[in-house]
Amino acid sequence: MRIHDSLIGAVLLLLSLAVLWHIQAFPPAAGQNFGPALFPGLAAAGLGLCSLALMWQGLRSGQPLLVLGEGLRSPRRLAAFAIVIASMAFYILLADRLGFVLCSLLILTLLQWACGVRMPVALAVAVAATLVIHTCFYKLLKVPLPWGVLQRFAW
């Protein structure tokens, strides 16, 4: 898929304007002419100028705004893309109730199946990946992952 440069430039310009609007609330530094908003403001101004240049160059090219590649013409790949988006929403909505382990097992198995991996292999990889990810984040990095319905089995 090819997205037109002017569309990307417009999104980046909106981002830079949002940063410039947000830094207006930063308090001034005591006894200095510049404060904590200086460097984010400079970065946002630079991003804004570059995005304007990108938009100008894109508009001059005359190319279509969006060109779908071979991957997005396949119904299977479109379904896989939809499953990725749906799995993110599923995790956001149900991770606290079901827990990280169950959500991760379901999501990883479904994503691999959608990409053409056979179910036994997808399930084995999902179990191994879930255990490794959970151990790394929960035990090593001390990130409080939700246990959900498996709270009584928490280690």
Image: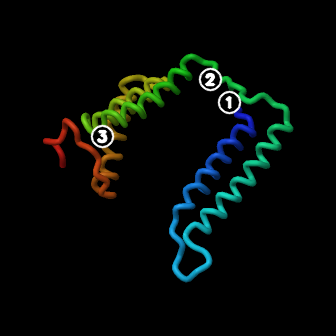
144 relative position to 75: left or right: left
- The residue at 59%/55% (across/down) is 21
Return the x and y of residue 30 as percentages of the image width and height: 52, 80
Q: Amino acid at mark 3?
A: Phe
- Residue that sits furthest to the bottom in the current view: 31
Sequence-wise, which precedes: disc 3 or disc 1? 1
Return the x and y of residue 11 as percentages of the image width and height: 65, 42
Return the x and y of residue 27 as percentages of the image width and height: 51, 69
- The residue at 28%/34% (across/down) is 102
Return the x and y of residue 26 as percentages of the image width and height: 52, 65
Q: Which residue occupies the foreground of this view, 45 or 4?
A: 45
Q: Amino acid at mark 2?
A: Leu
Sequence-wise, which precedes: disc 1 or disc 2? 1
> Could you say which quadrant of the image residue 1 lies in?
top right
- Residue that sits furthest to the top in the current view: 75
Are the residues tagged 3 and 1 within 8 Å (C-beta)?
A: no
The residues tagged by marks 3 and 1 sit, at their Cα atoms, a distance apart of 33 Å
Question: Is 81 situated above or below 57?
Answer: above
93 relative position to 45: left or right: left
Question: Is 49 situated above or below 73?
Answer: below
Which residue matches tag 3?
A: 100
Badge 1: few (under 14), some or many (20 or more) residues near its Cα, within 10 Å? few
- The residue at 57%/61% (across/down) is 24
Which residue matches tag 1?
A: 1
Which residue matches tag 2?
A: 72
> Could you say which quadrant of the image residue 129 lies in?
top left
